Image: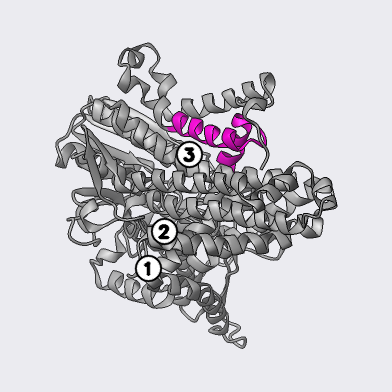
Amino acid sequence: MKVSDMRRNNRRRDNCIGLLVATALVACPLAASAQAELNLPILVPITGFLSLEGTSQRNGALLAIKNAPSSVKITAEVTDTGSSPEGAVTALERSLSRGKVSAVAASMLGTQMLAMLPVALENKVPLATVSGTADITEKNNPYVFRFFPGDAVAKGAHVRYVLEELKKKRVALVYQTTAYGQSGRKHIVELLKKAGIEPVMEEALDVAVKDMSAVIGKVQAARPDVIMLHLHGGPSALFIKQAGAAKVNLPIVAGSGMSQPTTVALMEPAELKGLCAETNAAPVAGGSPQMDKFLAQYRAEFKSEPDGFAVGQYDATSMIIDVVAKGAKTPEDIRKALSGGSFKGLAMTYKSDGKGNMAHSAVIICYDGKTRMPKIVKRYD
Amino acid sequence: MLLQILANALALGAAYALLALGFVLILNATGAVNFAHGDMVMAGGYVAIAMGSVLQLPGALLLPLVVAVMALLGFVFSWFAYFPLKNRPPVSVFISTIALGIIFQNSANAIYGAAPRKGPPLLSEGNFGMGGITIGAQALGIVVVAIVLIVAQHLLLNRSGIGRKLRATAQDREMAEAVGIRVNRMIALTFALGSALAGAAGLMLSNTFFITPTDGTNYVIKAYIAVTIGGWGSLSGAVCGALIIALFEVLFPSLPLLIPPLKIIAPWLFTQTASTILLYVGLLAIMFFRPQGLFGETVQRRV
């Protein structure tokens, strides 16, 4: 997509959001007293450093609401949580104070989720998120449901691809200093250790670090045979670009940040050659009639490309709508249905592991250096 | 290796220097901190992206246009953020600049979206090989453009009538007014000049490091630290402070590559995280023991 198109599309996006919410409300005739009701606040980071991912979440949730059966009357107000934990808690408390909340499409930012968990527990309201931070489902909180592979799954795929498919053993690991980065790093190192491997080099980067020549120099000096990245989207693109300029000719297997079309758009196709990344789904690669339909609809509604977060939140919202359509009336009903049931979504079949981890599959995508279109090369279920 | 690292640090420091210079110019003229200065860098990046997509020109040719637009924006900014509050305590001005900065961030988010964007390169994105080191064309361009702009700014302030008026305004507004200088006009001009420098930095940084609506917060912190390290109000100090920050970000964590025993003695000390901590520890030390900044009075010279 051209830059000018993307800019124009971004301008239209906010209008689309309002239209979608309105459509969801208008689509439900007032006279239909038999309709099931669902009040689903969408509390996601639309501004701040995770606004890109938060916007994908919002779009996924809104699209699922648009596709909801007419038997479910949905109220869904979007609130920007920013990037602070208190912003998320305030948004949640405000939603709860406004009326009966059935469930919440909650921020994918781990620190915000951790802050919202006690509030959700106290008010007995389920939170459906695509946060990858491992800790959120380790707090024995029965009201959290993660529709994105947690680190145990995603990093499992990440490490298995490096070891089993690429057959590499000298791993350089670069990760983010955020909760997301540290959590992923912990899993990667543990999984490598189980395979008897210790990274030959590892270093953490703050999201504000722009010039990465120091860490790239250290990677080169350690003589790895593969680079594993666990960085957010923008920093991943910066690293790969600067590593290319420094003539680092090593395979790079990145985290899900490099599966986002907007991140990939920052780079020339040639700069992506040989790059692989783990993710829950690669909607732009299509793969099934349902995913193709989602892709076309997403592009038409939001004039942008969907990523794995959009698909995850779409599936999460669809499952909530499904359980409500099937008779779940209260937040507790929804929680029980999410805990005990399974749902075939676009990306995978979701089922709780007892802790709220619903997603147990991940894929590895790779770029051929000719286009920005990824190809799914390996699926781990 | 050392030359390569220094080249990277110099390019980063040059862009930070433009940022810090604009910051200190406004600081001196108004006596208040402009917390939206980082957002001016962000705005400069987006102006460059917008113009680049329309005009299809390289950054070097877009630079005068971006500088002009940003100067105009700085001028308008002063009428919203400074003049209505100039007789209030300085805290009012810096709160108004915070508010305008947030407005800028959210406007950029509404117009361009949250995704990182890439600005146009100055000339190209290729690399030059010189004596065993590889220097990016963009990095070299940043250094050259920054030197040209810093020299131009120096000549403007020191060799022109308007520069003398600007300096007089910065040194003593009441006295400047008493001798017939139109102080408000000079202050508005300073906002324009500072914002133009920030815009130039934004154009260059947006290609090398991309740009997002929230990047301004990070940049204004760099400017603030550069000015504190170099000497509050000192132009030369601001440039030196900016270079020191860049050395901490690029050179310090690279030291084990240059001196391998360091990797064994204290590998934890030369990480990117530790170098950030050390930079701020150094900043605190400067504030405690040399509050006038490293270059203090000897090089301090208000606008």
Task: Give, as a three-letter code, the residue at label 1.
Answer: Val
Between the residue at mark 1 and the residue at mark 2, the CA separation in whole angstroms equals 9 Å
Frontmost residue, B254 versus B57: B57
Q: What residue would you read off at disc 3? A: A178
Mark 3 or mark 1, whichever is nearer to me: 1
Task: Name which residue lies at 20% across and 41% down.
Answer: A251
Helix, strand or loop at mark 2: loop
Q: Are marks 1 and 2 in contact (CB under 8 Å)?
A: yes
User: Which chain contains the residue that carries disc 2?
Assistant: B
Residue B252 position, x and y percent, is: 42, 25
Residue A371 position, x and y percent, is: 21, 62
Between the residue at mark 3 and the residue at mark 2, the CA separation in whole angstroms equals 22 Å
Helix, strand or loop at mark 3: loop
The answer to whether residue A204 is left or right of residue A242 is right
Task: Name which residue lies at 42% across and 42% down.
Answer: A210
Labels in figure, total = 3
Task: Give, as a three-letter code, the residue at label 2.
Answer: Arg
The answer to whether residue B2 is left or right of residue B110 is left
Have a look at marks 3 and 2 and say if they share a chain.
Answer: no
| In magenta segment, residue B245 | yes
The relative height of residue B246 versus residue A103 in the rendered view (above or below) is above
Q: What residue would you read off at disc 1? A: A3
The relative height of residue A44 versus residue B128 in the rendered view (above or below) is below
Residue A82 showing in the rendered view: no
User: Which chain contains the residue that carries disc 3?
Assistant: A
Callout 2 environment at 10 Å: few (<14), some (14 to 19), or many (20+)?
A: many
Q: Quadrant of residue A281?
A: bottom left
Frontmost residue, A308 versus A239: A239
Sequence order check: which comes first, mark 3 or mark 1? 1
Residue stretch in magenta = B220-249
Task: Give, as a three-letter code, the residue at label 3.
Answer: Thr
Q: What residue would you read off at disc 2? A: B117
